[in-house]
Image (cartoon, helix red, strand yellow):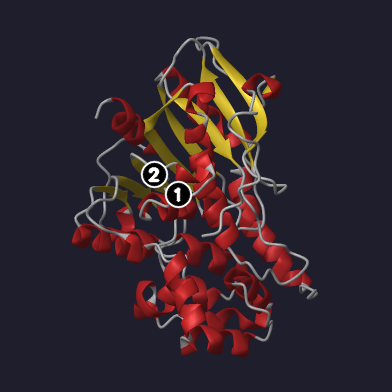
Amino acid sequence: MIYPIKAKFKKLIYMHATIWVGMLSFNTSATSIYEFNIEDYKSAPVISIDSSVDASFYRDIPYGDNEFAKLDLFRVNDLDNAPVVLYLHGGSFIGGDKSSSKIQADVNQFLKAGVNFIAVNYSLLDVDRIDSTGIRKSLNDVAHAIQYIRSNATQFSIDKQRVAIYGESTGANLALWVGLSDDLANNQSTNLIERESTTVSAIAAIEAQGSLDFLQWENLIFAPYGFKLDLLAQNDFSWYLASYYGLDNTNLDQVLSILRDGQSDILTYRAFIDILNKLDPLDPPVFISNTRAPVDLQETLNQGDLQKTLYSLFHHQLHVATFVERAIQAGIVVDAHAPEVGIYKESTNEIEFLINKLIHQ
């Protein structure tokens, strides 16, 4: 069913997504591991690779059959069985791309350390209609990308046991979701890709949300502020909420009622996407940092500027505080940075953290 999107909200959510661009039903019809030839995708690098690094670039390798399921590989030459890090772009599930120039410094730092780098695109919400699948398709894409990479470990020249993942904003949430989920491998599948593990050695999340479930923002993360999703009603946030949760309804009151009433299907969906309920002692170490959004949320809310409100809500340091509290309770190693709420990192940055976990531990 097609619904028009109010221009104001559409512009605002795109502006939020652009900040990051500029600054379990897996699809099994991807190319078979037996048919894949990495040399078919060799290309001139989309970013500048440091002259001190001998590396090759492979562009738009398909790992699934939807238009978004493609990845780019930066591979250190003459280095077999190298550790690998996956990068996931931001964009509010409606924008962004793996080829952002902002990753140039990251790529070179990893390559110099002998770590192969893979940037992954994933399915986005359809901005022209209510998306009945919701963000599940993005989550499933990322999990399948990890399995596809492992299934082609020889051609990618990677060590299947040393895989890390990180991202910013939406990409950070995807990294946390797949990295903290129990292994999604299906050992009974006739598809060899689906038998591969989705577990990772380390996770880094920059400007992340404490939960992908917005109801957790109401009930937990921003509860001290009395925050309610109704705040965004006047800006047609209903379209985004409906597509996000895969609901065929654009009336905000009805959407919120569905989410809050807790019928079995929506409870299942909420549990599926929630990051906090996936934490357990077997999870890998996590680096998480939020520093860029205004800390005084009440002042931001009082200003009535929706763009600033969205940015602050999506990237507030309380997201880190909530995640850290739950991670400590679960017994997970977490290195976090949210200085305005009294949380300080031990590592220099997320790159140092991931390299250390991949190479030195």
Of helix, strand and loop, which one carries label 1? Answer: helix
Q: Residue at x 24, y 51 (%)?
A: 282
Depth check: give the residue in front, 222 or 2: 2
Q: Which residue is mark 1?
A: 175
Q: Which mark is residue 350?
A: none
Point out residue 73 in the picture as x, y percentages from the top left corner. 57, 28
* Quarter of the image where one finds residue 355: top left
Q: Is residue 296 above or below residue 207?
A: below
* Amino acid beneath label 2: Ala
Q: Is residue 297 above or below residue 265?
A: above
Point out residue 57 in the picture as x, y percentages from the top left corner. 61, 21
Q: Quadrant of the C terminus?
A: top left
Question: CB of mark 2 within 8 Å of CB of mark 1?
Answer: yes
Visible residue check, residue 236: yes
Q: Earlier in the sequence, mark 2 or mark 1?
A: 1
Point out residue 356 in the picture as x, y percentages from the top left corner. 30, 30
Q: Is residue 306 above or below residue 176?
A: below
Visible residue check, residue 48: no
Q: Which residue is mark 2?
A: 204
Q: Residue at x 34, y 79 (%)?
A: 224
* Amino acid beneath label 1: Ala
Of helix, strand and loop, which one carries label 2? Answer: strand
* Quarter of the image where one finds residue 161: top left
Depth check: give the residue in front, 30 or 56: 30
Q: Residues within 10 Å of mark 1 (few under 14, many from 20)?
A: many
Spatial distance from mark 2 to mark 1, Cα to Cα? 7 Å
